Amino acid sequence: MGRRRELRAAVLGAAPRRLLTPAEPPVRAVEGRIVDASPHLLVLRAPGRTRGDEPVFYDFRMAMSESTVVWHGGKADLSALVPGREAVVRPTGDGLAADRIWVDILRVNGVIVSVARERGAHGAVHNVEVDQGPHRPRAHVVIPPENFGHILVRHPRLEPGQLFDVIASRSERGPVAVRPGTAQAGPLAEVPTGGSGALLRGTATWYSAGGRGAAYPALDSYGDAGGCPEAPVPCAPMPLLSLGSSLHVRNDCGKRSTEIQVTECGCTAARFCDRCVECGTSPRGRVVELTRASFVDLGGDLAVGCFNVTLVVG
């Protein structure tokens, strides 16, 4: 009865005490196109609210210091902050300076459609076509020879029909795979455990989308709820929701939490039965995908790709 009462309280809005404490508010990330950069100042052109049909942009200035960490296909220095590149910035706790900057970072995950191999100057280059699901375009990922061995550790069967998930860097050739996006090698999701509940624990990942929002793996396909008619059953047992539903998302590693609205169907995430090992080992299955900004807001590291999460649904 105690467990049932707890779940009922979560649905009605009185979330379990152990979920809400000790959680801190999110630190708002900033994403946009680099306009200018110096050793002490970064200027981003970020999207704002629209005026009628016209998008509005503003220039966001943020101080930098020797402690600012930059990612561009791996750990980089300030020379990676080239005007025209896209960046996501996590401010320091006081909001006055840049703590971390991810430059031209992308993520591609889904089911492999085809794999082609070509000879390059420094070894074989693999080109992987990936079906990311009905809500996202197909992606063509380049795996350079220097990263192929690292990718193969998590994706030993690089062939059509297998799951694929990589953190990548934007390039003129398309996404260039840098490292696996999953901590475990595994097949397609098979038989889920079934069931539902208002309190969910598992893995949170991110996907390459701007703004703030969440893709939920178990949207109802009936009517205008937003679910995919042929979506797989999630690996993790999850209740059905609709677009616009509210999720209370807590990063169990960074101890930050916030309310996030469901803005997309995360049916591709439903196929993954892996675990996040960012802080301990999460229960099996991906229970939410966050946009880049929402993931960083909650303390996530885009280069790592996941954190252990607790969701209150309702």
Image (cartoon, rainbow, N blue to C red):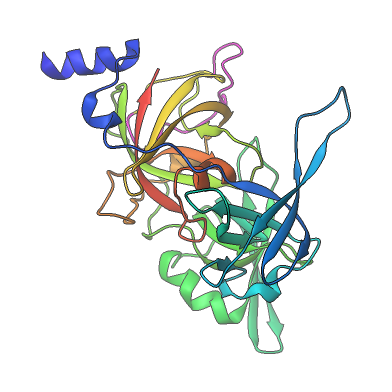
Q: Position of residue 52 (x, y in %)?
A: 87, 22
Instruction: Look at the image and say whether residue 227 sits in the magenta stretch.
Output: yes
On the rendered structure, is 183 left or right of 166?
left
| Residue 313 can be seen, yes or no | yes
Q: Residue 137: x and y, percent?
A: 70, 44
Q: Looking at the picture, how far across and down is residue 255, in whole percent? A: 33, 43
Residue at (33, 49) in percent of width and height: 253
Quarter of the figure that contains the N terminus = top left
Q: Which residue does the image show at 45% across and 59% down from the upper left?
A: 304
Q: Majority secondary structure of the magenta segment?
A: loop
Q: Nearer the viewer, residue 15 or 267?
A: 15
Whether residue 4 is situated above or below residue 145 in the rendered picture: above
Left or right, residue 13 beside residue 64: left
Tell me which segment is drawn in magenta: 221-237
Q: Quadrant of residue 224?
A: top right
* Residue 262 counted in the magenta span: no
In the displayed structure, does residue 119 sit left or right of residue 279? right
Q: Is residue 17 above or below residue 109?
A: above
| Front position in the image: 179 or 30 | 30
Residue found farthest to the bottom: 122
Where is 125 relative to 54, above or below? below
Residue drawn at (31%, 43%) of the image: 252
Where, quadrant-wise, is the C terminus in this rendering? top left
Callout count: 0
